[in-house]
Amino acid sequence: MKYVLVSIIAYLMGNIATAYLVSRAFGKIDIREHGSGNSGSTNVFRVLGAKPAVIVFLGDVLKGTAAVLIGRYLGGSYGEILAGIFVVAGHNWPILLGGKGGKGIATTIGLMLPIDPLMVVMILIVGIIVIITTRYVSLASIVGVTIYPIAMIITQKPLEYIIFSLVLSSVAIFKHRSNIERLLKGTESKFGQKKITEQEGK
C-alpha cells in the first residue's frame, strides 16, 4: 500500500506544471501554445526570457528532489525509485493539463540529486560542454540521459538502480524523438535562437 501511495503522491507532484504557471504569471500565456509547444524551461527561455526560464528550471528540479525524498521516507530505496519514475510521468503526461507536459530533463536532474549527486555533477558538466560546443540544448539532454545508465553500469550500482536509470533514459529519449529527427536533418533550433516554428517539438 505504501508504494501505491508513493506513486500517487509523486505523480501528482509531477503534475505541478511550473512552466504553465510561470508563463501565466509572467506573460499571461499558455506556454504550450507558443514556441515549440513544450512545457519546459528551454521553451520558456525562448518565449519569455531568462528569468522565467530559471524559475521553471529550479521549480522542476525541486519537485523531482522533493518527490524522491518523500518516496525514500515512506518506502525506502524502492520508494524513491517509484517516486522518481512517477514524478517524471506526472511531469511528462500531467492529467491536470490533458496529458500535455514537458520532457522531464530538469525533473530527472532533481530526482537524481538525493540519489547520486556526484553523478548529477558529472552529467551536468558533460551537458554544459555539449551546449557550449554545439548550442543544442536537446543534444545535451540526449547525451546526458544516455550517459546516465552507462555510468551506473560502469560504477556497478545495484541492479534496481541500473534498471531505474534505463527507464528514465528511455522515457527521455522517447520524449526527444522529434528533436532527434530535427538534429539528423540539421533543422533543430540552437540555444538563444528565438525564431522557431509553432509546430517544432510537438
Image (cartoon, helix red, strand yellow):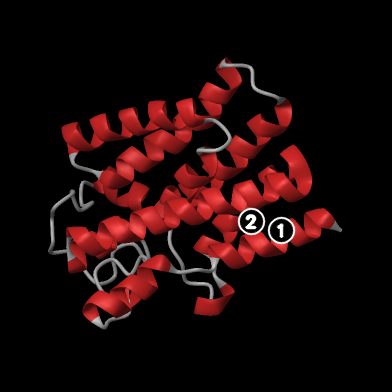
Q: Residue furthest bottom?
A: 28
Query: Based on the displayed image, in which of its 4 quarters is residue 18 positioned?
Result: bottom left
Q: Which residue is mark 1?
A: 7
Frontmost residue, 144 versus 124: 124
Where is residue 170 shown, x and y percent of the image?
55, 44
Task: Pinpoint residue 124: horizontal percent, then vertical percent.
Answer: 35, 33
What amino acid is at disc 1? Answer: Ser
Residue 121 visible in image: yes
Q: Is residue 123 left or right of residue 159?
A: left
Which numbered disc, 1 or 2, marks the residue that appears first in the sequence? 1
Q: Is residue 44 left or right of residue 92?
A: left
Q: How many C-alpha atoms fall within 10 Å of the one at disc 1: few (<14), some, or many (≥20)?
A: many
Residue depicted at 46% across the width and 25% down the height:
118
- Dot label at residue 83: none
Q: Which residue is mark 2?
A: 86
- Classify 71 as above or below 49: above
